[in-house]
Image (tube, rainbow, N blue to C red):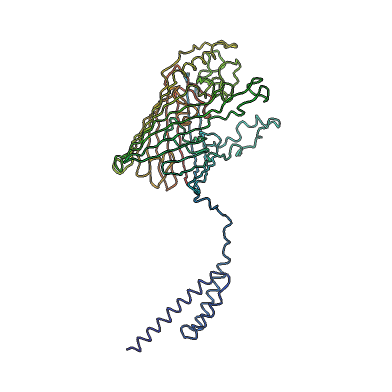
Amino acid sequence: MRIVQRQEWFRWLKVLTGIGLGTGILLAAATDTPDPRVDELMNLFVKKGLVTQDDVAQIKAEADAMRTNNGALPAASKWKISDAIKSVELFGDLRLRYEHRQGTSPADNRLELDRGRYAVRLGLRGDASDDFYYGLRLESAANPRSPWVTFGTSSGGIPLKASPSSGAIPYQGPFGKDTSGMYLGQVYLGWHPEKWLDLTAGRMPNPLFTTPMVWDSDLSPEGVVERFHSTVGDADFFANLGQFLYQDTNPDYSSGGMINNDPFGLLTRNVDQLFLLTWQAGFNYHFTTNVSAKMAGTLYQYVGRLQTNVAPYFGSDFIGEGAYTGPNGTYVNGASGYGVVNVNGFGYNSFGFPNNQVGVDHLLVLEVPLELNFKLGSLDAKIFGDAAYNLQGRQRAEAAAAGYANYLGPQQLTPSTVTPFAPQKNDCKAWQAGFALGNQGSLGMVYGTTSRKHGWEFRTYWQHVEQYALDPNLMDSDFFEGRANLQGVYVALAYGFTDNAIGTFRYGYASRINNLLGTGGSNQDMPWINPIQDYQILQLDFTLRF
């Protein structure tokens, strides 16, 4: 019985030894140069009778075949990341869009846009040593309020400017690329030395708790921000203090006649940089695991020596009106005058408009955004809103009325038959109220800030922005056309086809609030119409996030 057991044990030992030897030799085949110690080991196993010479020959043949099939191993990567960089994340998105916009004037004149568009955003961000972090992002358009480029626009209008002496890009035929490019949309450095303190400098993602009513979500302010955070019980308290460079006016000082084509001419130039200061404080209170409320108060203050003769005339009085002066005038009712020289020389020009649409004089805006997050069964829900009031709105209205009267009064070629309006001193308020609903983890999908397979979000809000309430250069350029004196409804639905592919439907309708006033703003999608009596926009997007 013992002899049988020993034979069985010896048979299994040979099997296991053969398996181990074969595996070792095959693994050794992964290298270009065979290890000579493998041959010595095989000879030893043959002498001990654990394997036969035929077994060794077969294993060697298989090893040679593997070495031939594998070929040379790839060389080590030549890319090297500095030890100062702790992490690198590639992020961004590719987006395609169909869009329809329509604006009608008080005389029922109409402008329509039907266009296919695309947008690309590509960036790197991560952590560096000693609690520093960094980020940069490229975008496909120079417009700070929109990364979108319209298909087929590279050939439009170019032949009219194509003389060799003009310096313009010559006409290139269809499918040209002169409107396509990549621009540095974000570049910033940050430092997080303590849990309660975060400092960021550069062109950065918007650090404020706000809504598109006040800030277009595509804007990346430039400057410095200090962020503070503290948790007490169930409440998270925060403060964001921003110092953003609104306009560089260098040279700040020059003696008269030093600079050719200086609007100051022979006068001494002595100006300051224009800054937007933001003072925000708020809290996020967690009632339960699924219920929280967030609220903040923000004060927007513009500081610096505002100059009326420095383009693009942020320092001039905001007028916000169109160019119409009467039935026999140069412009039809509803025309903004954009792109046409003001031959009468009156009014306060800006960005190609005969009446200023960008001025930030008499703006001291108080904003209060808020949101309530909770569950409806298994769904995520949010009630949100925003309210803003211009504390200097009465002065802004008075300056606008006086400037518009100055534009209408001394018309020389064709006397104006339009009567100036009295200052609309109460038109200095803005508010938004809305509701969002989605399955778990999907709120924000409408804006492309999150995505998940089979995720969905429905979002809607009502918005009311009066003529002298907000900075017209920061408002959402889509909803509603970056214009004041409009109110209307926004409806959107987003669905996640995969974990990073989103389809989105958006629709908006708005109408004029005060029929005595224009719809002030300088957005470049439909700059030719002011006032807008009714406005509609439809967007169908496909987004691939990464």
| Residue 241 in which image quadrant | top left
Residue 417, image x and y in percent?
Answer: 52, 10
Relative image position of residue 114 (x, y in whole percent):
50, 32
Percent across and percent down for residue 504 are 43, 39
Image coordinates of residue 419 in percent, x first then y, are: 49, 11
Rendering quarter of residue 342: top right
Compared to residue 343, the image places residue 219 above or below, namely below
The extreme right residue here reads: 165
Q: Horizontal placement of 233 versus 54: left or right? A: left
- Quarter of the image with the N terminus in it: bottom left
317 or 3: which is nearer to us?
317
Look at 44% across and 45% down and name the residue there.
501
Report how many numbered discs are placed on residues in the image.
Answer: 0
Q: Name the residue rendered at 50%, 86% in the picture.
A: 47
Q: Nearer the viewer, residue 49 or 169?
A: 49
